[in-house]
Image (spheres, rainbow, N blue to C red):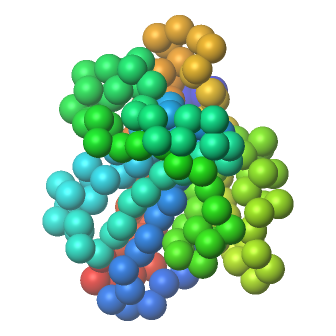
Amino acid sequence: MKNEAIKPGPALIHLTPGQTVRVLMVCMGNICRSPTAHGVLQQRVDEAGLTGRIRVDSAGTHGYHAGEPPDDRAQAHAARRGYDLSRQRARQLLARDFLDFDLVLVMDAANERAARALCPPGQQHKLHRLTAFCTRHAAHEVPDPYYGGADGFEQVLDLVEDACAGLLQQIRQAAPSA
């Protein structure tokens, strides 16, 4: 991963003025990366006074951990940066989510393949990698920290914070009242 500034690509979000934006973060088990992204974006939304305008949730492509809280390590690293993930519970991604959310943001290529296979026709435009919104890091994926050490959870936070800042900027540009 490079720490050089990158230029954002074309706008990935197309919204109508005044539209409530519904964002779903997706990883494999919904216990590390997607709850971290959910927590970071939710806090940024709250701090910006946009709580009623942007709805955030998370899910996993697999239901291994359905009903469980985020991984203790993910929670601890997030808490050190001021994010509370404790109220979240894992759930599995459903085809219905592509109808209920405006953006379905996956963490890596495997998540993208699994989500794309579940995505109903006509909803593919909602599916993107979260890293597409990074403005400081040149990364194509948010790596899974589950089997690694503390550095992996910190790297996830670095990428997620960058991507969520870029995402919030694009949402504001796409829906000026947001």
Please tell me which residue is depicted at 82% across the width and 60% down the height of the picture. Answer: 117
Q: Is residue 28 left or right of residue 73?
A: right
In the depicted structure, whether residue 102 falls above or below residue 27 = below
Is residue 11 at least partly visible in the picture? no
Direction from residue 37 to residue 59 in the image, left or right: right
Farthest residue toward the front? 67
Q: Foreground residue, 145 or 44?
A: 145
Q: Quadrant of the N terminus?
A: top right
- 9 relative to 111 in the view: left or right: left
Residue shown at 36% from the left, 80% from the top: 20
- Where is residue 56, by image quadrant? bottom left
Q: Is residue 121 left or right of residue 137?
A: right
Residue 171, horizontal then vertical, whole percent: 42, 70
Residue 130 x %, y %: 57, 50
Q: Nearer the viewer, residue 30 or 46?
A: 30
Above or below, 165 relative to 66 = below
Residue positioned 51% across, 59% down in the render: 24
Say if 109 sits above or below 42 in the image: above
Q: Position of residue 43 (x, y in %)?
A: 26, 49
Residue 77: quadrant of the picture: top left
Q: Is residue 57 visible?
A: yes
Does 170 sit above or below residue 32?
A: below
Give the residue displayed 56% in from the left and 35% down from the top: 65
In the depicted view, which residue is nearer to us: 15 or 100? 100
